[in-house]
Image: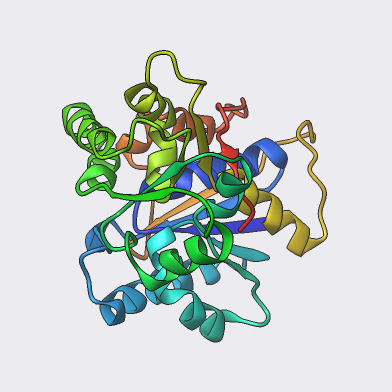
Amino acid sequence: MRIALMDAGIGLLAAAAAVRRLRPDADLVLSSDPDGMPWGPRSPQELTARALAVAEAAAAHRPDVLIVACNTASVHALPALRARLGPDLPVIGTVPAVKPAAAGGGPFAVWATPATTGSPYQRGLIKEFAADASVTEVPCPGLADAVECADEAAIGRAVAAAAERTPDEARAVVLGCTHYELIAERIRAAVQRPGRPPLALYGTADAVAAQALRRLGKQSVPWAPGEGTLTVILSGREAELPSAARAYGEGRQLQPGSCRPAAAVETGRS
């Protein structure tokens, strides 16, 4: 079983680690685009073209399913990806976990890139699943880039700025960019208010990993014998996992011989 994941950068690590937790024996193909980072400021046409190139690089390795582990790409390029690669290759998109956050009750915030914040797609999710909830959309400029570079100082500044824009009464935060799941506990610590119930975080990594297995008719086997292979493609070139990826538990979990669970975030289904 071979599962491919794609993103502009290392945001795909969270979903890849979730797949590894569920099926340690799965062969993983990670395809990203460091030469084209970031995708968010690009026009939808440019973003789609780059996403198609990254997806086709992954598809060349003949995966059984492709996870688009990127909210921005899912918002702007998912139909084009499915049209180009389907129906033979199932393509799983990543949807901000608005629905489970709304079901959790209480006001919540959606942290996302400026390209996703306020998009018709995200607004549609909020209207469909959280029309009766108090929802605050919080743009997080620079946060995904800082996570991509594992720049601790820049991460701290971007998280602090987004936390200031998050209402004190928020009971939960939807992590609307896959990069943010790599620093989930830093976000929790920044937003948690004294005297308030524990803040809930909603990501997508576990949900898309489970959905990929469902599409393949496979079950979770966390203790399967053996360990799957790891293929890394950077802007079309086979390479090693970027050094910044190893700054995060999810990246270290993907190293050979390191099939140990990383902390999971509450997730919604994509």
User: How many numbered dots are placed on residues in this image?
Assistant: 0
Depth check: give the residue in front, 77 or 164: 164
Considering depth in this image, is 50 or 185 the residue closer to the camera? 185
Please tell me whether residue 66 is drawn above or below residue 198 in the rendered image: below
Vertically, is 196 above or below 201?
A: above
Q: Is residue 202 visible?
A: yes
Residue 200 rendering spot, x and y as whole percentages: 52, 32
Displayed quadrant of residue 8 = bottom left
The residue positioned 50% from the left and 80% from the top of the image is: 79
Q: Is residue 210 left or right of residue 81?
A: right
Q: Which residue is rendered at x = 54% and y = 51% of the image?
A: 97
Where is residue 122? Give x, y as percent: 43, 64
State the quadrant of the C terminus: bottom right
Q: Quadrant of residue 251?
A: top left
In the rendered image, the quadrant that contains the N terminus is bottom right
Is residue 171 shown left or right of residue 113? right
Mark yes or no: residue 240 visible: no
**Is residue 223 shown left or right of residue 124?**
right
Q: Residue at x 52, y 84 (%)?
A: 84
Q: As drawn, which residue projects farthest toward the top? A: 195
Tell me which residue sits at (61%, 25%) in the image: 260
Residue 169 in percent (x, y) is at: 40, 32
| Residue located farthest toward the bottom when viewing the structure as drawn | 83
Q: Position of residue 133 (x, y in %)?
A: 51, 50
